[in-house]
Image (spheres, rainbow, N blue to C red):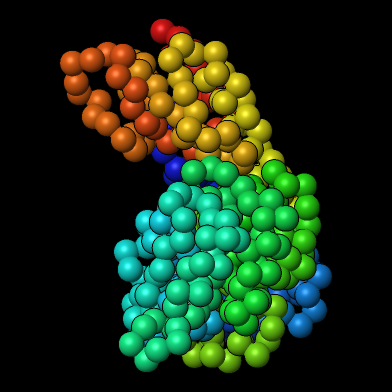
């Protein structure tokens, strides 16, 4: 009954098999391995972007941070929401890797609107005393489990283009969003106006690999230099390549996302039947944010369920007080794990 994070699940056997195969013999290092050649070709075909620059790193934090550093100057503002992953969960890594670019918060929650973004951009620049206008970063899936529609992404990118600014998509849960929208990778990225994407693998069955994709290859050399300088160019790069190769082969990346989203749908349906449960946002991918009575949280924790309490304390006098929890489904939990959780909730 592990619902704390999709980082906590096992690596998919197909990916482990790919890593084991790559462990045979010798390969050139630093991304010159044959596996990376195949990965690059597969991602370009997948995204319908034959000229795209494609790189691999081990963590989502460095994928986002180095991508943004490549798209901006140290004196720029990076526009994102208050609940963007780069704001909430990356320990000032974007500021560190950009050399000081300022995260500028747009809106009040996990999503921004075109009107909010336009106003935030218009307020910057024009004086040497202010942060200058820099890239827009969109978190997809959001940190409240919601998904930007293609229309919403296009509208935000349109605002960015009004000011000649690049757009970065933080796709740590890229596959979950894609499955939810029923679209193609190209439609959710460059066709909507996105310039760079962090294409996540770790949360969706990989051991630890993320792709960084620039649709304009003019950014390639700078990213390579930044990755090396940051200490994130792996000498035994084949183990990153092998993970991504296993992830992409046979559309495993879509299958695991479909499984995770289906698990979440099953969990959400069961939670709706529990007394006192209130969803703060309609689940759209593989994450649920729900308020539940303290007594229900205690019952679940006592039964061995593991998830995060976002607001409120488990210990308290009022059993009916609503506490906010986050419930994340990965590909491996399955109907049995979900049903075990729901059974424990019912007591």
Identified at 45% across, 49% down, the residue is: 109
Q: In this view, does 214 lie to the left or right of 290?
A: right
Asked whether residue 257 appears in the rendered view, the answer is yes
Give percent across and percent down for residue 298.
30, 19
Q: Split into 4 quadrants, where in the image is the C terminus?
A: top left
225 or 249: which is nearer to us? 225
Asked whether residue 210 appears in the rendered view, the answer is no
Give percent across and percent down for residue 257.
65, 45
Give percent across and percent down for residue 87.
39, 61
Q: In this view, does 150 lie to the left or right of 92?
A: right
Identified at 66% across, 33% down, the residue is: 262
In the displayed structure, 182 sits above or below 39; it is above
- Figure label count: 0
Q: Give the residue furthest to the top.
A: 347
In the displayed structure, 13 sits above or below 264; it is below
Q: Is residue 270 left or right of residue 294?
A: right
Q: Split into 4 quadrants, where in the image is the N terminus?
A: top left
Identify the image quadrant of residue 267. Answer: top right
28 or 232: which is nearer to us? 232
Identified at 34% across, 22% down, the residue is: 322
Identify the image quadrant of residue 151. Answer: bottom right
Identified at 53% across, 39% down, the residue is: 287
Give percent across and percent down for residue 304.
36, 23
């Amino acid at each position: 009954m592990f619902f704390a994070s999709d980082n906590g699940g096992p690596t998919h056997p197909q990916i482990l098999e790919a890593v084991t195969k790559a462990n045979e013999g010798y390969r050139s290092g630093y991304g010159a391995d044959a596996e990376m050649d195949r990965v690059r070709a597969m991602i370009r075909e997948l995204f319908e972007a034959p000229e795209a620059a494609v790189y691999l790193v081990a963590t989502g934090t460095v994928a986002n941070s180095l991508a943004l550093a490549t798209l901006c100057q140290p004196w720029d503002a990076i526009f994102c929401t208050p609940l963007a992953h780069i704001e909430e969960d990356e320990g000032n890594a974007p500021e560190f890797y950009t050399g000081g670019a300022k995260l500028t918060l747009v809106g009040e929650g996990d999503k921004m609107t075109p009107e909010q973004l336009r106003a935030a951009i218009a307020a910057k620049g024009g004086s040497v005393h202010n942060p200058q206008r820099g890239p827009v970063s969109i978190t997809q899936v959001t940190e409240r489990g919601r998904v930007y529609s293609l229309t919403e992404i296009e509208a935000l990118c349109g605002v960015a283009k009004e000011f000649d600014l690049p757009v970065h998509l933080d796709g740590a849960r890229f596959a979950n969003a894609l499955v939810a929208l029923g679209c193609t990778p190209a439609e959710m990225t460059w066709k909507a106006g996105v310039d760079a994407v962090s294409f996540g693998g770790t949360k969706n069955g990989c051991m630890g690999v993320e792709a960084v994709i620039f649709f304009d290859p003019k950014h390639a050399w700078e990213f390579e230099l930044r990755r090396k300088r940051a200490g994130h160019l792996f000498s035994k790069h084949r183990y990153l390549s092998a993970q991504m190769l296993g992830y992409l082969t046979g559309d495993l990346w879509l299958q695991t996302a479909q499984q995770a989203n289906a698990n979440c749908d099953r969990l959400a349906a069961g939670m709706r039947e529990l007394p006192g449960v209130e969803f703060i946002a309609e689940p759209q991918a593989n994450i649920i944010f729900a308020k539940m009575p303290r007594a229900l949280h205690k019952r679940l924790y006592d039964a061995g369920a593991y998830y995060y309490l976002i607001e409120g304390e488990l210990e308290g006098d009022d059993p009916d007080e609503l506490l906010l929890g986050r419930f994340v489904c990965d590909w491996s939990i399955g109907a049995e794990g979900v049903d075990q959780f729901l059974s424990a909730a019912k007591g």
